[in-house]
Image (tube, rainbow, N blue to C red):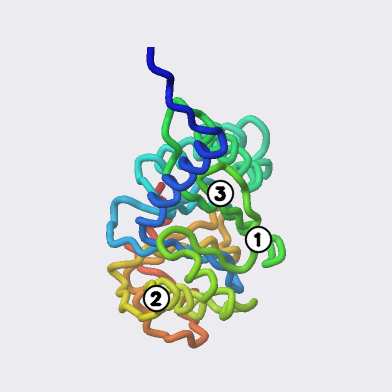
Amino acid sequence: MTTPFYVSPQQAMADRAEYARKGIARGRSVVVLQYADGILFVAENPSRALHKVSEIYDRIAFAAVGKYNEFENLRIGGVRYADLRGYTYDRDDVTARGLANVYAQTLGTIFSSAAEKPYEVELIVAEVGDGPEDDQIYRLPHDGSIVDEHGSVAVGGNADQISSYLDQRHREGLTLAEALKLAVESLARDNNGGERSLTAEQLEVAVLDRTRPQQRKFKRVLGRQLARLLDSEGAPADSAAEAESPAEESSDTEE
């Protein structure tokens, strides 16, 4: 009878973490940052059907990188959790912190289980408040830990380099156009320090806009509005508040 090959628990967990990190790093990055009127989500994503950024509830949105089927299952579970809690108790009882705790338990259980591979995903859960000081942004790595972020955060791809770039340049009170320009500049930087050119067709952009009069604050930035913001080159842009075309406004009902 042969002796089973022994691997220490510490080595096994380190190998699982390395496996998950490599899978996440292969994906294109997502940037989330605060601006004066809310929270901006920008992902390098040429697909118009497979979203990396989605609405969860009234003031809560979700962004993810990694394997699409895995983070899509988590997104759907988050929507069900939020709907059930809001229906059972009150809509105000659905919070980003509560949702992040649910995701952390799920990811942590999967990561520590030897029966299945760890999820190759990294999540961001964000909630827009009545003011910038009330905004909440939580990052959840593959192992289920929770990191409370402020100002800006990047996940996937060369996230460390992008985060460093954002930390040096992000400030409070950015307009939507300024925040979008900063996010695109950070995503366009490659591992060698060079810059690429990213067009509107390569970007998925959404906001949690605290100034919206309706209860749902999530909105996708599409079409002509996105083109105007990208062309404004960071100048204070009233175009973000301009009336949108019917095609753009219909994006509020997605997800």
Q: How many marks?
A: 3
Nearer to us in this view, 35 or 71? 71
The mark that comes first in sequence, 1 or 3, is 1
Q: Secondary structure at mark 2?
A: loop
Specify the label residue 48 is tagged with.
none
The mark that comes first in sequence, 2 or 3, is 3
Name the residue type under label 3: Leu
Q: Are marks 2 and 3 in contact (CB under 8 Å)?
A: no
Q: Residue at x 49, y 32 (%)?
A: 7
Residue at label 2? 189
Name the residue type under label 2: Arg
Category of crowding for the residue at label 2, using alpha-carbon neighbours closer than 10 angstroms: few (below 14), some (14–19), many (at least 20): some
Residue at label 1? 135
Q: Are marks 1 and 3 in contact (CB under 8 Å)?
A: no
Q: Residue at x 63, y 30 (%)?
A: 88
> Would you identify the image quadrant in which residue 118 lies?
top left
Q: Position of residue 37 (x, y in %)?
A: 59, 70
Nearer to us in this view, 34 or 164? 164
Residue at label 3? 140
Q: Secondary structure at mark 1?
A: loop
Q: Position of residue 104 (x, y in %)?
A: 59, 40
Name the residue type under label 1: Asp
Question: Can residue 84 be seen by looking at this rendering?
Answer: yes
